[in-house]
Amino acid sequence: MLWYKNWLEMRWRTVFIALLFALQMFAVYRNAGNGTGNVVAATGAFGYLWIIASIMAAGTGIRTQSASLAAVKGLHGSAYFTLSLPVSRADLFGVRTIMGVVQMAVIIVLANCGLWALFPAAQANTTLGDAMGYGLAVFVCCLGFYFFSSLLAVFLDPTWWLYGGLLAIGVCWWLLRGVQSAFNVFKALQERAPLITHTIPWPAMFTSLAISLILFLATLRVIQTREF
């Protein structure tokens, strides 16, 4: 039941994310056809979409999901109904986390494959291994944004958690834009991406995993103790 309930809550959100990537893919493909595209521009164009996808896939933790960021009608859209289910809050959060991570992984894999297949410069200057490494790096680096969104959603209403998450991450991106450290997660999504450097950004990935673990444990702790 939990799996089906979560699917009802996140299906339209998934469609919205897929449409965003489809539109961006079309724009990249058109520029490539005009001879104005390059790998650096393509990875930069998708950098912010990876973050948006991870934030939206995280949703609101164990509470109601909403594609329109407004109240959802129906039984599956009731937060009180969710919290009254005969399962622990840890199970609720665990199932929601697994579904969100899988959703994020599928979107990243499909978009990454499309980026490499449709972009001539990527095929000419990189290998399929580079594309796979880029997908892995994007997925791991976005886990930190995913769990940050989950933690933020515990405290904010559905109307504000997306805007708050995007604003906070945007500020961090702006503050770290000049930091060239290998541990900079944002750089791993752009100029240090495997499609450009042909190497896996392990320091940034380990940084993201550490942040993800801390945020996951913090979110789980808050969910288990907070009065909703």
Image (tube, grey):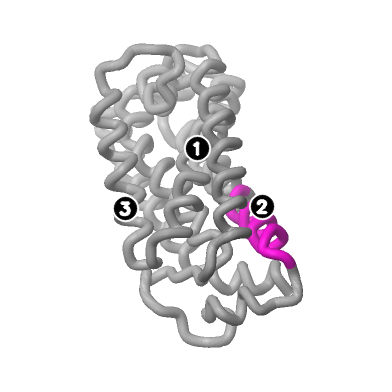
State the separation of the CA atoms marked 2 and 3. Answer: 23 Å
Is residue 113 visible in the rendered image? The answer is no
Tell me where residue 167 appears, x and y as whole percent: 27, 46
| Contact, mark 1 vs mark 3 (Cβ under 8 Å) | no
Question: What's the amino acid at mark 2?
Answer: Ile
Q: What residue lies at 47% left-to-right and 59% top-to-bottom?
A: 154
Check disc 2 and report the residue beneath it: 98
Of badges 2 and 3, the one in the foreground is: 3
User: Where residue 138 sits: x, y (%)?
Assistant: 50, 32
Q: How many marks?
A: 3
Q: Amino acid at mark 3?
A: Gly
Which residue occupies the foreground of this view, 202 or 29?
202
Q: What segment is highlighted magenta in the picture?
A: 88-101
Q: Which mark is residue 144?
A: 1
Quick check: can you spot residue 31? yes
Residue 193 at x, y = what percent?
Answer: 44, 21
Secondary structure mainly formed by the magenta segment: helix
Q: Earlier in the sequence, mark 1 or mark 2?
A: 2
Q: CA distance from mark 1 to mark 2?
A: 15 Å
| Mark 3 secondary-structure assignment | helix
Q: Which mark is residue 164?
A: 3
Label 1: which secondary element: helix
The location of residue 35, given as percent across then percent down, is 26, 27
Q: Name which of mark 2 and mark 3 comes first in the sequence.
A: 2
Indicate the amino acid at tag 1: Gly
Query: Which residue corresponds to the image point at 53% horizontal and 48% vertical from the top-left?
Result: 107
